[in-house]
Amino acid sequence: MRSFSGTLAAAFGEALLRSEPGRTFVARARAVVLVPGTPARPDAEALDPLPWAPRFPQPMAEALAELSQELLLPGLDGVLPNTVLPLATNTPFVQAFMVGLNSEMARELLWRGFPAPLDATFFDRFWDARSAPDTPADVVPAIAAWGDRPLGTRPPTTPPGPTTERFVLLVRSELLRRYPNALIYAVIAGPPRVERQPAFSGVLPPDVRFFGFDFGVDAMRGGAIVIQEQPTEPRFGIEVGTATGSATHLPATDPNAARAAERTRQLPVRITLPASLLLG
């Protein structure tokens, strides 16, 4: 055994150094696991990082809304029926939530003895972008590569994308309950005028839907939001103002059902909301 000389404080410091978890765990692991060959890292006392961690593609905005819709959209109770509101994302909140979520997942797996790295990115999607699969993840790059980057900032190595908060359209209306598959997209002022589809979307029962786009609020100025009836869901009926007399239905004057369907098919409806009405 090694003898200590000096004060008790020196002995205490040496005891702390020898019991440091990074040393004791590595020593114990190397005592029971034989690693063949020469160490791949300069530090022979260091274990190689774990190469694998589970990934979960589910958008976490849904899980947050299940806890409370107010956590996802504060002030939602104050939104009146049949209202359209312009909003913007909150990147610092989203990143803080995702970092905390991944940290707690790592702690849970560690507690249960699952061999996953503590700095892994298990969840990288906050918004539901399944309708636009090319949309970049909300946690880019992986958390292990963040270093001391502040929350809410984009790393310089990420692909080009919006540098400001993204524009979000909130709709609380009976219209979308009646036509849940209606198409909603943005028209950006030109020239040329460009149609942009939502990059993500979400539903908050019973009557709230939101649509996020990959551009900021300022890009909407001069443009418009379009709400369009789904073309693949045709409606049939009598045009407003058609005189039917005392009959309760149209007479069967067409030679076949195709001609009757052609005569009674209703054209899809499209509503255009100028950005000037939304943004003021």
Image: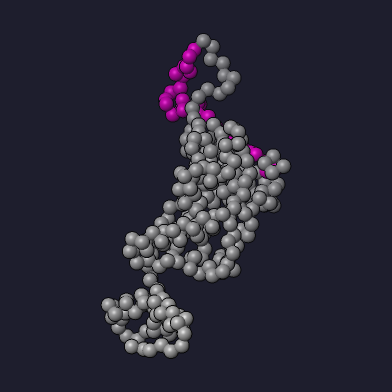
Q: Position of residue 264 (x, y in %)?
A: 50, 26
Q: Residue furthest top?
A: 246
Residue 212 located within the stretch drawn in magenta? no
**Residue at (53% x, 41% y) in the render:** 209
Pinpoint residue 43: horizontal percent, then vertical percent. 42, 83
Q: Which residues are magenta?
A: 247-276
Residue 248 sits inside the magenta stretch: yes
Outermost residue to the front? 7
Regarding residue 186, the answer to whether it shows in the image is no
219 w.r.t. 20: above or below? above
Residue 171: % across, % down: 57, 39
For residue 69, above or below residue 178: below
Residue 87 in percent (x, y) is at 62, 46
Number of numbered discs? 0
Figure coloring: one colour
Residue in the picture at 64% in, 53% down: 216
The front one of 273 and 209 is 209
Residue at the image position 46 percent from the left and 28 percent from the top: 261
Q: Is residue 125 left or right of residue 172?
A: left
Please name whichever residue, 64 or 10, is drawn nearer the observer in this view of the structure: 10
Q: Residue at x 40, y 67 (%)?
A: 117
127 or 226, nearer to the observer:
127
Q: Is residue 5 visible?
A: yes
Quarter of the image with the N terminus is bottom left
138 lies above or below 25: above
Where's the C terminus, which quadrant?
top right
